[in-house]
Amino acid sequence: MKKVKTQSSRRLSRKWHRVLGMAAALPLLLLSISGLLLNHADSLGLHERMVSSRWVVHCYGQIPIGEPVMVEVGERTIVEWDRRIFMDTQELALSGRLVGAVGFKDQLAIALEEVIGIYDGHDELVLTLDELSLPKVPITGIDVVDQRLLVQSGSTWYLLSEDFFSAQETNQRDQAQKPKKLSQKALKELEDGIVQGFSIPLSRLIVDVHSGRLFGWPGWVITDLAALSLILLIILGLRLLPNRRS
């Protein structure tokens, strides 16, 4: 009876050993290859090699979600996409909901709900107007008159001084320009610009593949399951060793 139970247990162990081996084969192969590459990252120059592709950009979540909107100022296009702000295809150091943009004195003012960024003719951010310097937030509109900024909050318009240190209420104006939907052609150009502007060292990509982080939570779950499968494979393998009697 004991011999029958032992044989049955060994058959069950052999079955699970085979199933786990097949299920974990690909993840373990990926872990092994990426681990070997990381061990020789310096000699292979993986830290210096930069990679950029649409697949990599999507894996790292660099393509925003939602519907982008834009305003045009002369030949410049200001885009807000999931609270990220772009001038043409260049991402700016601003974040928030786009309200509008105007040009004045060879400068460009980009208004978000909580802040206004002032850019010079070289696309450099020279001044940021926030709730401490603005008359009131949230901002609902922006315009320009006599080379001075007009800022709308609610239904009230404020005329900012030339040095932006003070503001006074002014007469009600017509509704300022509002952001509109980005065309498909402009959206494609923006996506291409994001792809071209994003690159990471190859070693970083391999590290994230090795840990599973590159693929989000499914990646690290699969990596953890592969590691657990390897532990079980070792345990089941030891059980399958032949019993030798002295």
Image (tube, rainbow, N blue to C red):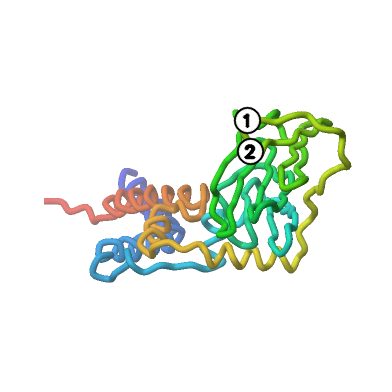
Q: Which residue is mark 1?
A: 131
Disc number at residue 182?
A: none
Name the secondary structure under disc 2. loop
Who comes first in sequence, dot 2 or dot 1?
Answer: 2
Q: Position of residue 52 (x, y in %)?
A: 49, 67
Q: Which residue is mark 2?
A: 115
Q: On the picture, is 10 further left or further right than 194?
A: left
Work out whether 127 lies above or below 63: above
Q: Could you say which quadrant of the image residue 143 lies in?
A: top right
**Which residue is at 62% across, 30% downward?**
131
Amino acid carrying label 2: it is: Val
Name the secondary structure under disc 1. loop
Tag 2 and tag 1, C-beta contact below 8 Å: yes
Q: Position of residue 181 (x, y in %)?
A: 79, 55
Q: Position of residue 43 (x, y in %)?
A: 23, 69
Work out whether 184 lies above or below 115: below
**Which residue is at 55% across, 49% downward?**
125
Q: How crowded is the residue under tag 2: few (<14 C-alpha within 10 Å), some, or many (20+)? A: many
Amino acid carrying label 1: it is: Glu
